Image (tube, rainbow, N blue to C red):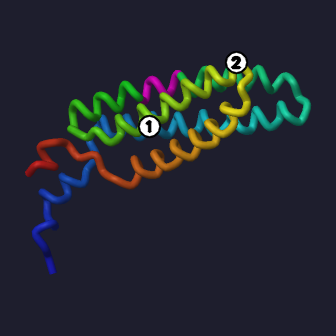
Amino acid sequence: MLSVLDGPRADAARRTAPVGWTLRAMVSAHMVAIAGQPVFAGVYLTGDYDSLRWHSIGADVVTSVGYLQLIVAIVVWARLRRSGPFLATAAVVAAETAQYFAGLDGALWLHIPLGVATVAALTVQFIDVWRRPFPRRAARDA
């Protein structure tokens, strides 16, 4: 039995806009970048001191990708009127920034738990952006 939600209009509403795909790509790149950080830190803690350099480079990459993701989330908010991705990204980027400076300062009491929380939050965001469509406003409002 067909419902009101079936048909071309509903199909168009489920399609993700290009800016939604861009957000998905940025969150995915961010997820890949952050996944290496615990590995580099763990190898460093086993005595391979060169891994600290890799962890430092990774921190620069993760932070840069986070800020690029924030820009894309602002565009999603402006174009699709979805504030959720911006708020989630802003929280992750704020935590990453605090973690970055805690790492530079050697405050491991803050750096390590904040790192675990940041990876967990970004994982939840990754799942969220891939589970829901980001339809164009016209298709969503139809």
Q: Quadrant of the N terminus?
A: bottom left
3D distance between C-alphas at marks 1 and 2: 32 Å
Is 133 left, or right, of 91 in this rendering? left
Q: Is residue 66 magenta?
A: yes
Q: Residue at x 21, y 38 (%)?
A: 81
Would you place residue 128 above or below residue 53 in this image? below
Question: Which amino acid, by three-letter code, is at mark 1?
Answer: Ala
User: Which label belongs to residue 46?
Assistant: none
Bin the neighbour count of mark 1 within 10 Å (Cα to Cα): few under 14, some 14-19, many 20 and up: some
User: What element does badge 2 sit on?
Assistant: helix
Instruction: Give the vertical position of 12 relative to 53 (above or below).
Output: below
Q: Position of residue 113 (x, y in %)?
A: 66, 39
The residue at 91%/31% (across/down) is 47
Q: Quadrant of residue 83?
A: top left
Residue extent of the magenta highlight: 64-69
- Secondary element at image label 1: helix
Query: Callout 2 environment at 10 Å: few (<14), some (14 to 19), or many (20+)?
Result: few
- Image location (x, y in percent) of residue 90: 41, 31
At which x and y percent is residue 29? 52, 35
Q: Is residue 15 above or below residue 82?
A: below
- Circle 2 is placed at which residue position? 105
- Circle 1 sits on which residue? 25
Q: Residue at x 80, y 26 (%)?
A: 51
Residue 132 is covered by the magenta coloring:
no
Name the kind of residue labelled 2 in the image: Asp
